[in-house]
Image (cartoon, rainbow, N blue to C red):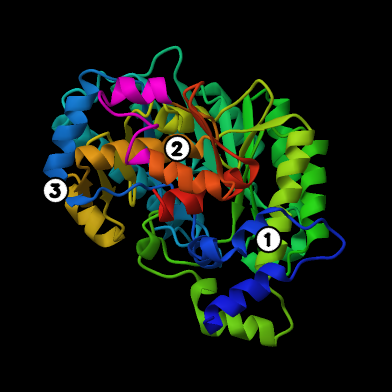
Amino acid sequence: MTLAYEEAIGSLHAIDPAWPRPAVLDVLEAPENRHLLDFVQEDPFGAHVFPGNVPGSPEDFLRDLDAQLATSGPIHLWSYIPTCAYRCRFCQYPVVLVKGNPEVAYEKAKHWVDLNIAEARLWLAAVPHLAGAEVGEFNVFGGTPSLLPEPEIRRLLDFYRAHFGFTADTTVRFEGDPSTFTPSKLELLRELGCTKLSSGVQSFDDHVLELCGREHSAAMCVDFVRNARALDFDWVSIDLMYGLLDQTLDSVRRDLEVVLANEVTAVVCTKLHLASYSDTRTGVTGEKPAAWQLPSYRDKLVRDGHRWPTLGEQYQMRELLTEGLRAAGYIEHPTMYFARDGLGPEKWKSIMVDQDRQEAEVAIGLGGSSSCRASEAITDVNSKRYAETVSAGRIPLGSATRFTPEAQEARAVKMALTTLQPLRDALHRTRFPGRSLFAEPWLGKFRSLAARGLVELRPREGVVALTPVGEVLVEAIITTEL
């Protein structure tokens, strides 16, 4: 037994005795599941990017995307605005700090709207079927797009609505920081047809927020939710993180109580991730590591008397959130995305990952992740190079990979599993003629998972379903075994 494995087992067994012991611990400590423990011990982000398995080029991706858009839809469309007022201590994303006096900050923010619109025009010119593709959901994400001045928010949304395939069924979603979702900006977003809001609350514990480097308070988070609900937004979603510095089970319990008391529409629960996205290929990372990714900084925090939750405590936190939200009527679909019963699943996620859909996504902006069934591409994460490329009249795709037919099938299965819904062999056969979930290579893989209590095989129903423990470990399963 290696020292690293001993440390992982020790962290797994170190739980808060005041709370139940999660069943997943029994699975992770089993020798046959050591690879799963290795994966979760590294704290990677969930599998939000599915890289291809053979080299490709930006031109390949754009052709593949156009071919798919000719016959499919709706798509998920992103506008990624990388502006932030500060950098959180856990953040790996490509962001651009917008600081200075109001006039300087305005011009910096306007510059990134200019670049985003200019890049969007390049996409429209290079992908002929993009303008006519129905947009299922349009997301303005970041960064902190709510940091934009109100005239720039209007200009951005007006441009996309005028140039892309928005319909009466298209939903518009806007992300932001609680402190920048001012009442006037909320009113503007409502006027512009935005019906969904997302905010990175992360915690309702002011001490935890301060250690994260967040510059908003728990009270601001509550005010955002209440103001948004007062304006009748259809969907008010918040992000909560667990495994944060000095976070305890009691702190997470209080977070849950605030969520339920304020009847938040949806909650996304994310484990703190310190492994580099670029190493795990599970997300898009910027060029600068997060402060908490630096071992010397993490060690100093411990010397100063702070504490990181153990792996066992993190799973207790996850179980507390999951069971508490489910008991209150929230439905989990996809993994760790909870919506009040009858309102979910997340529309943009279902467009991308539901087994009967899995349509294309187009992400415009610094560090965007775009994909279709045949290939995927990542937009450049270097802000200077990105701006120069857009100014030169080229789409700033930094990398692209393609999927062999076998990899396309594997990707479809992996994405479908993240929904936590049963895999249906009939749907699989329709999409991949001559293939079945109950034939090789899938049958052997699923039998191995079933033997370890992670999936159920129901061949008479034509269904493969994750067990409760399999649902907890779905990201580790799809990354290490499929």
Observer-nearest residue: 315 or 247?
315
Rounded to the nearest angstrom, the CA distance separating label 1 from label 2 is 30 Å
| Residue 251 versus residue 455 in the image, above or below | below
Residue 480: give x, y in percent of width and height.
42, 56
Q: Quadrant of the N terminus?
A: bottom right
Residue 93: give x, y in percent of width and height.
43, 58
Q: Quadrant of residue 466?
A: top right
- Residue identifier under label 3: 57
Residue 319: give x, y in percent of width and height.
72, 50
User: Which label belongs to residue 314?
Assistant: 1
| Residue 53 versus residue 90 in the image, above or below | above
Q: Could you tell me if residue 90 is visible in this image?
A: no
The residue shown at (60%, 84%) is 299
Q: Which residues are magenta?
A: 425-442
Q: Earlier in the sequence, mark 3 or mark 1?
A: 3
Identify the residue at the far right of this view.
Answer: 18
- Residue identifier under label 2: 140
